Amino acid sequence: MGMTTFDTLLIANRGEIACRVIRTCRKLGIRTVAVYSDADARAQHVRLADTAIHIGGSRPAESYLRIDAIIAAAKATGASAIHPGYGFLSENADFAEACEQNGIVFVGPSGASMRKMGSKAGAKLLMQAHGVPVVPGYTGENQAPAHLHAEADRIGYPLMIKAAHGGGGKGMRIVREAGEFAAHLQSCQREAANAFGRDRVLLERYVTKPRHIEFQVFADSHRNTMHLNERECSAQRRYQKVLEESPSPFMTPDLRARMGAAAVQAAQAIDYCNAGTVEFIVGPAGDFYFMEINTRLQVEHPVTELVLGLDLVEWQIRVARGEPLPLTQDQLRPRGHAIELRLYAEDPEQGFLPGSGRIERLRLPKPDARAHRWRCDRRRHGRHFLRPDDHQTHRVR
């Protein structure tokens, strides 16, 4: 791939990530284009960008999820590159391919790489074929109860029965011993059929007391692939990460080297280019298994940036231009420790339902802290309520 230059970039997103990309573009001398829905006409990312263009109604389906509207906005404003941010269309292979078909640089991986991660069972088989450790299990089509029971005995207990087409924690059962399998299988299949219309299941070894550790990976168009060390996100609530930290307190130099090599193997297995995250489940003894690849920049990327002193959005843009990776693996110089945390606005007296209220006092640590700056809204009874859509990341000094 040759070098590609672009002086105008459209951010196909909103809120904090759009502001984040705009700041890096400003540093690189790249003109920015924001897109906005009816609800976001006064949003901060609209004010920060050099140009802003309206793309539709307030619902995401009417605006930020409309590939045609975003491509049209890029053409109308002379943007020859698009950064998808995270969420919305960031992992949409059709969007990446639409950019390519219209001669627009997509700041992210190819649609082909995304599609290889589209099937959980397919991704697992692909990783296994490339020597990446995967959780022992069964993903086959033979769903006869006797065959599934035999496969469960082969895998060993405890194990997890999971709906093949499920999500959100539905259609999942933990089986502690062989005698429980038949009853749990029937229950899981019944729930899967009711929730998803299909009762096919997968079997996986259940890792007790697991840790969730992910590796930031980067690859360029010159076939260079590296990892930028790990982030641990084992503390979770309702399938949302509560704490994300780097380096992981569980990690040893040997384990980091082995997991990092596996992360690079995983990226190479799908011909990856640009930023991505390889997620692993890790057992108490340091045994680790591939979970998935997030084919985008993640919310937690500042944790890696702070420890390594890098700008990952700048890396994304340089790689999208066809430049080689700025550093090699042995040139990384990690320093210090970083933690990102999610603050939950929940009311414990109302069963922990989401709630908002007034911030009476906020004190942030110094000197090296990043925090979200929130705009307050007086529309309710004159009190200050947080509006999460207008925050941006800044360094506290």
Image: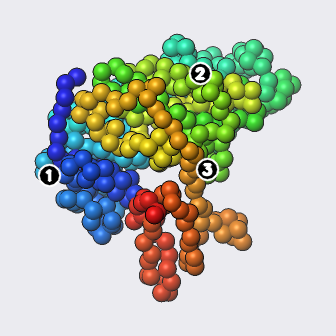
Tell me if 122 is positioned left or right of 67 in this view.
right
User: Which quadrant is home to the N terminus?
Assistant: top left
Q: Position of residue 100 (x, y in %)?
A: 22, 33
- Rendered position, 255 above or below 337: above
Residue hosting label 2: 258
Rendered image quadrant of residue 316:
top left
Residue plotted at (43% across, 34% down): 276
Q: Nearer the viewer, residue 357 or 115?
A: 357
SS of the residue under disc 1 = helix
Residue plotted at (54% across, 26% down): 260
Please, which residue is most extreme toward the bottom here? 382
| Pointer 2 local density, CA inside 10 Å: few below 14, some 14–19, many at least 20 | few
SS of the residue under disc 2 = helix
Q: Nearer the viewer, residue 270 or 215?
A: 215
Tell me if 153 is positioned left or right of 202 in this view.
right
Residue hosting label 3: 243
